[in-house]
Amino acid sequence: MSTELKPGRYTVRYVPPGIQLPFIGGLYANPKEIHQPIAGEALGPRTQVWDVEPAQDGKFTIVRPGVIPSKDDPAGSSTSLLGWNVGWPNELSPKGIVLLDDGYTEFEIKPVGEGEKLMYSIQDTSGSSIPENKYYIAIDNKQQLVSWPYDMNQEEGQLLPHWQFTPFSN
């Protein structure tokens, strides 16, 4: 059975470094507003469903079906396709925070494990300010999704963040 992620609609749950599936609880990728950070939040009635779509070179985009009202557009009349986009670099997250935006980043999404322990790494390959680093999507202490650097000179035994993609059906 293939463990490669297939295009489709999913809820996306964070699996912190060192944690194995299955586990109870956790934080799910959930947007607040357009052009604002995507938050990690507990499962609830407003938990976001995401469309995972193929891009070029085996990469994927993660986009939101529909629109979200913003301060600038309270009626939510925007027709832009909104998705995960890395931006707002800062001292704590030199690559940036993952925003809900009308431009979006292409990610390498690779399987880790199999069966009920299947999860995925989400790598931001859009360029690195430090050549020895690779950037993986994680959740920071503010419960925001971030593109976090991992030193690939120490990759062996390094605990990376992972994500569980659970197929969604109405």
Image (spheres, grey):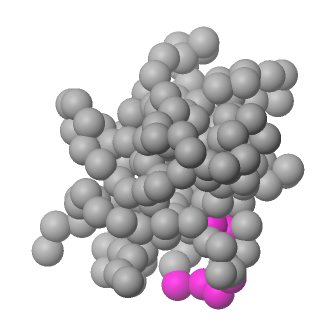
Q: Is residue 123 visible?
A: no
Q: Residue at x 35, y 54 (%)?
A: 52
Residue 5 quadrant: bottom left
- Residue 103 visible in the current orientation: yes
Please tell me which residue is depicted at 24% across the width and 66% down the height of the picture.
3
- The answer to whether residue 1 is above or below residue 35 is below
For the C terminus, give its image quadrant.
bottom left
Relative to 94, is 141 above or below?
Answer: below
Question: Looking at the magenta stretch, what is its main secondary structure?
Answer: loop
Q: Would residue 144 appear left or right of 147 to someone viewing this image?
A: right
Above or below, 163 against 92 in this view is below
| Residue 69 in the image, given as x and y percentages of width and height | 67, 50
Q: Is residue 167 left or right of residue 134?
A: left
Quarter of the view holding residue 16? bottom right
Q: Position of residue 66 (x, y in %)?
A: 47, 55
Q: Is residue 17 left or right of residue 42?
A: left
Query: Which is nearer the eye, 64 or 144?
Result: 64
Q: Is residue 170 above or below residue 52?
A: below
Spot occupied by residue 6 in the image (x, y as percentages of width and height): 23, 60
Say how many tags the image has. Answer: 0
Please tell me which residue is depicted at 60% across the width and 84% down the height of the picture.
23
Looking at the rendered image, the quarter that the N terminus falls into is: bottom left
61 is within the stretch colored magenta: no
Q: Magenta span covers which residues? A: 22-28
Question: Does residue 26 show up magenta in the picture?
Answer: yes
From the viewer's side, name the closer residue of 151 and 87. Answer: 87
Tell me which residue sits at (49%, 28%) in the image: 103
